[in-house]
Image (tube, coloured by chain):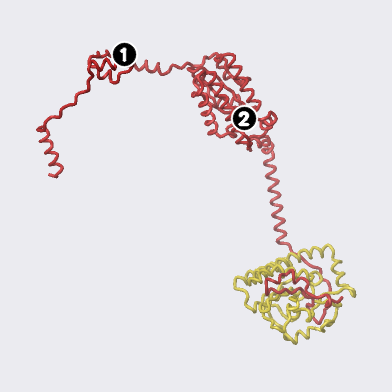
C-alpha cells in the first residue's frame, strides 16, 4: 500500500494502471453475481447464510453492496491488484438497481495462497481506512484458518457493518472531517501498488 | 397308604403296650439337713421343698373392681384451679417463672428466676417456665400454640415450657411464632428430651427443675451457635450482652427482613409494574428501530485514479496459511521505506 497523490493516473512506485491489470486479468467486462464462489468453498446452506448476511448489509446501508469472490489467482497474481481490477471491470448482476461498482465492497479470497483482501469503491473510500478493513479480515482469520469460510465471511461482514454504522454517524455529525480528506493537493489516499500488495510480502 | 401313615398307625397301636415311665420324685431334705441349712439366712427351695410347710391362704382380694372404678383410678389428675388460669395464661408474663400457685418454695423460686434472668441477658431467646403440680392437668381450652401466638407474637422470641413439678417427662415445649422459622422443630424436640434426661438424674423436684432449666438454656445457646455460625465452645462460654442485643436485633429470616417493606412494596407494585412495562416497550421499540435503521453516507466527489472508473482505493490483505502468523503480526503491512506521502 502506498500513499500517492490524488488523481494520479499511475502508481508512482510501479506505474500500475487499470490497463496493466487488464493485460493480466483480461480487458473485457466480467459478468458475476455478488457472491461468486468460483473456488467452490461454500456448500448450499452456507451460501444461503452468506447471502442472507449480504442482504442484511445491503438493507442497512442502501447505498452500498457487498461482493465476494473466491478463486485461485495463480502465483503471478496479486490480491490487491486483482481486487482493483475486478471492482472496476465486473458487472454484478444482482447489485442494487441504480448502484454502481463505486458503491461496492469486494472481499476476495484465494484458497490456494490462503489470503484474503478487501477492495472498496470510491463511495466508501473517504470513510473506510485500511485499518478498518484489516479489522474485518482479522475477525474472520480464525474461521478461515480452520477452513470455515462461510463463518469467516459472516464475521467479517458483521464487523464491517459495525464500522460502517459508526462511520455513518460520524459523517452525519462531522461531514467536513471526511470531506477534508479529499481536498487537493495535501490529502493523500491509499492506492494499489503491485510492488507491495502481495500476501507474501505481508508475511515477511 | 403312605409310609408315614403306616408308621403313625403302628405307633398308636403299640404305644399303650409299652411300660409306663416312672416319674422322678422331687428331692427332699432330711430333718437334719433342714436344720443345718436353716441356720443360714436363706434356704434355697425352702418354699417348694418343705414338705411340712403349711400352704399360705390366698390373700383376700375382695370384689373385682368395676369399670367405673377403673376409670376413676386412671384419671387421678386435677385440673388447674380456675382462679389461677388468668395468672397463667391471660397475658405475656413479666417474670420468666410463672408459678401463681406457689408450688416452688421461695429459695427455689428465687434461684430459678435468677437462672432464667441470666439466660435472658445472654440469649436473644427468652425462656418462660410455667410450673404446675405433678398431678395437675391443663384445661383443654388452653393450648400452648395459641398462647404463643396470642401473647408472644411480638417482642423477643421465646420458648415456653409447661413444667409439671416432680414429673419432668410430662414437660411440654412451645415456641413463639417467630421462632419456628429460626429453629427447626426437630431441634426443639431434642432440646426438650435432653433437658428431661438431665432432670431425671435429680431426686428432688426443685433440683429436677433446675437441672431441666440449665440443660435447656445450654441447648438454646447451642441452637443460636448453630444458626449464627458462632464457632466456639458451647458449654462454658456465654454471649456478651452486646452480642446478645445484636443477635436480638438481627432479622431472623428473609421474611422478617422483608416485612417492613411489604406495605410499601404493595403500594408501589402496580405503578412499578406499569413503569417496567413502559420501559420494556420502549427498549423493544428502540431495538426494533435500531434493527430497522438504515445508514447513509454523504456522496463525496472522489477523483478517479490509476484509470479506475469505480475504485482505486484498497483495503487490507490478510494471510491465513498458518496459525503461527496471527493477524496482530500482519497489521503493519508495508515497510516504512515503501510509504510515500
Q: Which chain is yellow?
A: A
Number of marks present in the image shown: 2
Separation (CA) of disc 1 from disc 2: 57 Å
Same chain, labels 1 and 2:
yes
Asked whether residue A145 is in view, the answer is yes
Q: Nearer the viewer, residue A1 or B132?
A: B132
Task: For chain B, give the colour.
Answer: red
Q: Secondary structure at mark 2?
A: loop
* Residue on which the image places disc 1: B61
Structural crowding at the residue carrying mark 2, measured as other residues with C-alpha within 10 Å and reported as few (<14), some (14–19) or many (≥20): few
* Residue on which the image places disc 2: B236
Residue A82, placed above or below residue B227: below
Q: Position of residue B325 (x, y in %)?
A: 71, 72
Name the quadrant containing residue B108. Answer: top right
Between discs 1 and 2, the one toward the N terminus:
1
The residue under the point 57% across, 27% down is: B216
Residue B151, placed above or below residue A75: above
Amino acid at each position: 500500500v502506498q500513499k500517492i497523490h490524488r488523481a494520479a493516473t499511475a502508481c508512482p512506485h510501479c506505474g500500475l494502471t487499470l490497463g496493466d491489470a487488464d493485460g493480466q486479468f483480461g480487458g473485457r467486462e466480467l459478468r458475476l453475481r455478488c457472491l461468486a464462489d468460483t473456488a467452490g468453498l461454500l456448500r448450499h446452506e452456507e451460501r444461503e447464510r452468506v447471502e442472507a448476511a449480504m442482504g442484511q448489509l445491503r438493507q442497512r446501508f442502501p447505498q452500498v453492496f457487498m461482493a465476494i469472490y473466491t478463486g485461485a489467482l495463480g502465483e503471478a497474481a496479486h490480491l490487491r491488484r486483482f481486487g482493483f481490477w475486478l471492482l472496476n471491470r465486473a458487472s454484478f448482476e444482482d447489485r442494487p438497481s441504480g448502484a454502481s461498482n463505486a458503491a461496492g465492497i469486494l472481499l476476495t479470497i484465494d484458497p490456494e495462497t490462503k489470503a484474503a483482501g478487501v477492495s472498496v469503491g470510491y463511495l466508501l473510500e473517504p470513510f473506510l481506512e485500511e485499518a478498518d478493513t484489516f479489522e474485518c479480515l482479522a475477525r474472520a482469520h480464525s474461521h478461515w484458518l480452520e477452513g470455515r469460510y462461510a463463518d469467516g465471511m459472516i464475521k467479517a461482514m458483521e464487523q464491517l457493518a459495525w464500522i460502517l454504522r459508526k462511520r455513518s454517524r460520524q459523517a452525519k455529525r462531522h461531514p467536513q472531517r471526511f470531506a477534508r480528506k479529499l481536498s487537493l493537493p495535501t490529502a493523500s489516499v491509499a492506492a494499489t501498488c503491485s510492488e507491495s500488495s502481495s500476501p507474501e510480502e505481508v508475511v515477511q | 397308604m403312605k409310609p408315614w401313615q403306616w408308621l403313625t398307625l403302628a405307633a398308636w397301636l403299640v404305644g399303650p403296650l409299652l411300660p409306663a415311665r416312672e416319674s422322678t420324685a422331687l428331692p427332699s431334705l432330711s430333718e437334719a439337713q433342714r436344720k443345718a441349712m436353716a441356720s443360714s439366712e436363706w434356704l434355697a427351695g425352702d418354699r417348694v421343698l418343705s414338705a411340712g410347710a403349711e400352704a399360705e391362704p390366698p390373700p383376700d382380694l375382695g370384689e373385682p373392681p368395676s369399670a367405673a372404678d377403673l376409670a376413676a383410678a386412671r384419671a387421678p389428675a386435677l385440673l388447674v384451679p380456675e382462679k389461677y388460669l388468668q395468672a397463667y395464661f391471660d397475658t405475656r408474663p413479666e417474670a420468666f417463672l410463672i408459678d401463681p400457685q406457689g408450688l416452688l418454695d421461695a429459695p427455689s423460686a428465687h434461684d430459678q428466676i435468677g437462672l432464667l434472668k441470666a439466660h435472658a441477658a445472654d440469649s436473644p431467646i427468652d425462656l418462660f417456665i410455667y410450673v404446675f403440680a405433678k398431678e395437675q392437668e391443663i384445661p383443654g381450652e388452653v393450648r400452648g400454640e395459641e398462647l404463643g401466638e396470642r401473647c408472644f407474637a411480638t417482642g423477643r422470641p421465646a420458648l415456653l415450657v409447661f413444667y409439671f413439678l416432680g414429673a419432668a417427662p410430662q414437660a411440654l415445649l412451645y415456641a413463639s411464632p417467630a421462632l419456628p422459622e429460626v429453629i427447626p422443630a426437630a431441634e426443639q424436640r431434642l432440646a426438650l428430651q435432653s433437658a428431661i434426661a438431665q432432670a431425671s438424674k435429680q431426686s428432688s423436684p426443685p433440683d429436677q427443675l433446675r437441672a431441666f432449666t440449665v440443660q435447656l438454656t445450654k441447648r438454646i445457646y447451642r441452637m443460636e451457635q448453630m444458626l449464627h455460625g458462632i464457632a466456639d465452645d458451647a458449654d462454658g462460654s456465654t454471649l456478651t450482652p452486646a452480642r446478645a442485643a445484636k443477635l436480638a436485633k438481627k432479622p431472623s429470616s428473609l421474611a422478617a427482613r422483608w416485612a417492613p417493606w411489604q406495605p410499601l412494596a404493595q403500594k408501589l407494585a402496580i405503578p412499578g409494574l406499569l413503569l417496567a412495562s413502559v420501559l420494556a416497550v420502549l427498549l423493544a421499540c428502540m431495538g426494533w428501530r435500531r434493527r430497522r435503521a438504515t445508514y447513509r453516507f454523504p456522496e463525496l466527489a472522489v477523483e478517479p485514479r490509476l484509470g479506475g472508473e469505480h475504485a482505486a482505493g484498497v483495503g487490507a490483505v490478510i494471510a491465513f496459511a498458518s496459525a503461527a502468523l496471527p493477524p496482530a503480526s500482519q497489521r503493519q503491512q508495508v515497510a516504512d521505506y515503501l510509504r510515500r506521502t
